[in-house]
Image: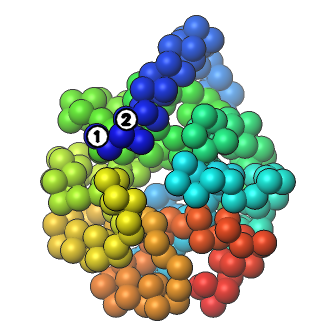
């Protein structure tokens, strides 16, 4: 595991212990019963992809460990509204506080102000986090293969699906794709960022697609910045994108989305 990811996971373990002092599975089940049904994250993407139209998961993200703060006056629901008006298919909301300056409230506010399905972007390592994700209004969670053991990944994946959550399984290499394929995930993310060097290579997605079953939807992550990048993915039959930094680094994330996919 890369050192930055290892640091994040070690800190996340401490957060999970605090979460366990606040919630039990039973108390979270009660909160889940008060939630509206999931909005259909996978379904929204599938509808676009089946028609060979670009499905954009637009990300609300204040900061990252590698790039620092993108915007000082960060108001997640307003950014989400921009994305929705610009044609985003789904939303991604960072809730990790220590490394990305996100909060659980960001996701709750976004859910209240928009109608799009939302993925909770965080580092999930414990079933309680999955119950918590559903309780705060997430429609989908992210599971990162590089951060989890195979048995742990399997347990968390099935826990999420049993709760009605969709799952995006994120990979960075052919070895991770091979592990993820055992789950037969509907949503397979390929992150083009090398965890060791932090360099981005879009060929990671192009090469990885040949090792993924046709019934999985490939979502390319990281490094999509130009219309040429989008055309290259479309030429390889990839129509789903998770984009954050290239939008968040612009004065108007929604306008940036519209311009990129015009």
Q: What is the basis of the colouring in this image? A: rainbow
Mark 1 neighbour density, 10 Å: few (under 14) some (14–19) many (20 or more): few
Quickly name the residue at label 1: 1
Mark yes or no: residue 18 visible. Answer: yes
Q: Residue furthest top?
A: 21
In the figure, 85 relative to 244: above or below? below
Give coordinates of residue 229: x percent, y percent.
Answer: 44, 85
- Is the residue under label 1 in contact with that under label 2 (CB below 8 Å)? yes
* Left or right of 162 in this view: 249: right
Q: Residue at x 39, y 69 (%)?
A: 200
Q: Residue at x 48, y 43 (%)?
A: 141
Which numbered dot is residue 6?
Answer: 2
Give coordinates of residue 18: x percent, y percent.
Answer: 57, 14
Q: Give 254 or 182, whichever is nearer the viewer.
A: 254
Circle 1 SS class: loop
Quadrant (top left/top right/bottom left/bottom right) for the C terminus = bottom right
Question: Counting residues from the N terminus, which is met first, the one under dot 2 or under dot 1?
Answer: 1
Q: Residue at x 75, y 58 (%)?
A: 71
Give coordinates of residue 101: x percent, y percent.
Answer: 67, 42
Q: Give 163 or 93, whichever is nearer the viewer.
A: 93
């Amino acid at each position: 595991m890369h050192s930055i990811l290892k640091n994040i996971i070690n800190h996340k373990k401490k957060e999970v212990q605090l979460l366990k002092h606040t919630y039990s599975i039973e108390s979270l089940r009660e909160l889940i019963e008060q939630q509206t049904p999931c909005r259909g994250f996978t379904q929204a993407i599938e509808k676009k992809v089946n028609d060979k139209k670009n499905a954009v998961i637009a990300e609300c993200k204040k900061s990252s460990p590698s790039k620092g703060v993108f915007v000082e006056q960060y108001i997640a629901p307003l950014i989400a509204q921009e994305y929705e008006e610009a044609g985003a298919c789904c939303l991604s909301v960072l809730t990790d506080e220590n490394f990305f300056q996100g909060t659980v409230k960001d996701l709750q506010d976004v859910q209240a102000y928009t109608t799009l399905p939302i993925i909770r972007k965080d580092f999930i390592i414990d079933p309680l986090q999955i119950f918590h994700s559903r309780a705060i209004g997430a429609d989908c969670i992210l599971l990162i293969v590089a951060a989890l053991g195979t048995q742990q990944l399997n347990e968390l994946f099935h826990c999420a699906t049993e709760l009605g959550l969709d799952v995006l399984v994120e990979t960075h290499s052919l070895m991770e794709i091979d592990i993820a394929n055992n789950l037969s995930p509907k949503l397979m993310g390929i992150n083009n960022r090398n965890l060791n060097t932090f360099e981005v290579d879009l060929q990671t997605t192009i090469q990885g697609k040949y090792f993924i079953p046709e019934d999985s939807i490939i979502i390319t992550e990281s490094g999509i910045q130009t219309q040429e990048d989008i055309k290259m993915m479309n030429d390889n039959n990839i129509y789903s994108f998770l984009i954050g930094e290239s939008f968040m680094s612009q004065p108007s994330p929604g306008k940036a989305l519209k311009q990129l996919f015009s």
